[in-house]
Amino acid sequence: MPIHRATAFAPASVGNVGVGFDVLGHAFAALGDRVRASRSRPPGVRIADIQGAAQPLPRETERNTAGMAVQSLWQQLRPDFGVELSIDKGIPRGSGLGGSAASAVAAVVAANELLEAPLAREALLPHAVAGESVASGSPHADNAAPSLLGGLVLVVGPRVCRIPVPAGIRCVLVHPRMALETRAARRILAPAVPLPAFVRQSANLAGVVAGCWAGDLGLIRTALEDVVIEPQRAPLIPGFAAVKAAALAAGAIGCSISGAGPAVFAWCEEGTTAEVLDAMRAAFGHAGLDSDGWTAAIDGDGARIEDRE
Ligand code: HSE
């Protein structure tokens, strides 16, 4: 029996995790986007509806991350039917929470379910990345890979590698109520990295990954420091230095910008999350920004099918 409709949920994600610009990210399942894909007689991919977006999102397939992700899948597989997408945004636009990637991921996971021979999860990643790049301007998988596959994921060229997360640590995420466009936050980055910063950042990325594998929180604490991207983007986020200082003073293992910002994440030992969250929100408050905050697993689930008929 063919599947006529399928709905998928894809979680938010923390891109970069500070030290892994464009190559390291983790799922954050406290919030996410939902997409329903429905078979249609006309061929091609159409956006039928968008709900939950505070600002209007493009409805043209080519300008919409969900639409482009499914278009990419359809171009590869050429099924003899079309698909209509209904998008329900749970992630604020321009937040640094991986909303563009989550819509793309939820869309390909839902549309894949309609196929007679659905692709395996990992095979959907290039299509989700093709969709996400409509928003960011350049393909990178540090949001799409964890949103699709779950957990903490390192992207190595065409390969993805899930990294074990030490027991007892969680992520606190605070989103100040303002928006930053990813394209703009990428445009300001210097094209070259000074050699000393490259050396430190290499050690820090390796240190976070090694610390996760070894369950060595002390090593993660030392290494979770972005010396390349964070100093360039911090001026875009009012109060960032105070928010980071407050998180670390409240006991966070490390704190940096989530994706392109303005959201800020902190990795914390379980017993400290409430204190860290309050401290970060208070610091944004002192900078004049209201904020929303969440706590979730770093090793959380990736996208899931919620229903199909
Ligand atoms: N790695 C990306 C960036 C995430 O920091 O620009 C946002 O798409």
Image: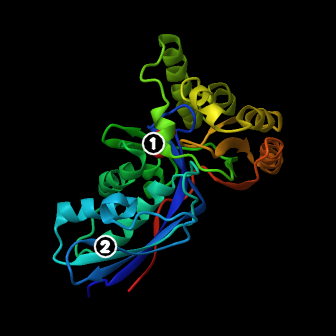
Three-letter amino acid code at disc 1? Arg
Other-residue count near label 2 (Cα within 10 Å), few / some / many at <14 / 14–19 / ≥20: many
Other-residue count near label 1 (Cα within 10 Å), few / some / many at <14 / 14–19 / ≥20: some
Q: Quadrant of residue 243?
A: top right
Above-or-below relation of 293 to 1: above
- Report the side of 225 relative to 145 (left or right): right
Q: CA distance from mark 1 to mark 2?
A: 25 Å
Residue annotated with mark 2: 46
- Point 51% across, 46% down: residue: 181
Label 1 SS: helix
- Report the side of 85 relative to 56 (left or right): left
- Point 44% across, 37% down: residue: 23
Residue at disc 2, CB closer than 8 Å to ligand 1: no
Residue 3 position, x and y percent, is 31, 83
Label 2 SS: strand
- Point 56% across, 39% down: residue: 17
Quadrant assignment for the N terminus: bottom left
Inspect this view and state whether residue 151 appears: yes
Three-letter amino acid code at disc 2? Arg
Above-or-below relation of 138 to 27: above
Q: Quadrant of residue 122?
A: bottom left
- Point 34% across, 53% down: residue: 125
User: Which one is nearer the viewer's eye here, 93 or 199?
Assistant: 93
Residue annotated with mark 1: 183
* Dot 1 and dot 2 residues touching (CB under 8 Å): no
- Report the side of 140 relative to 88 (left or right): left
Residue 258 position, x and y percent, is 59, 43
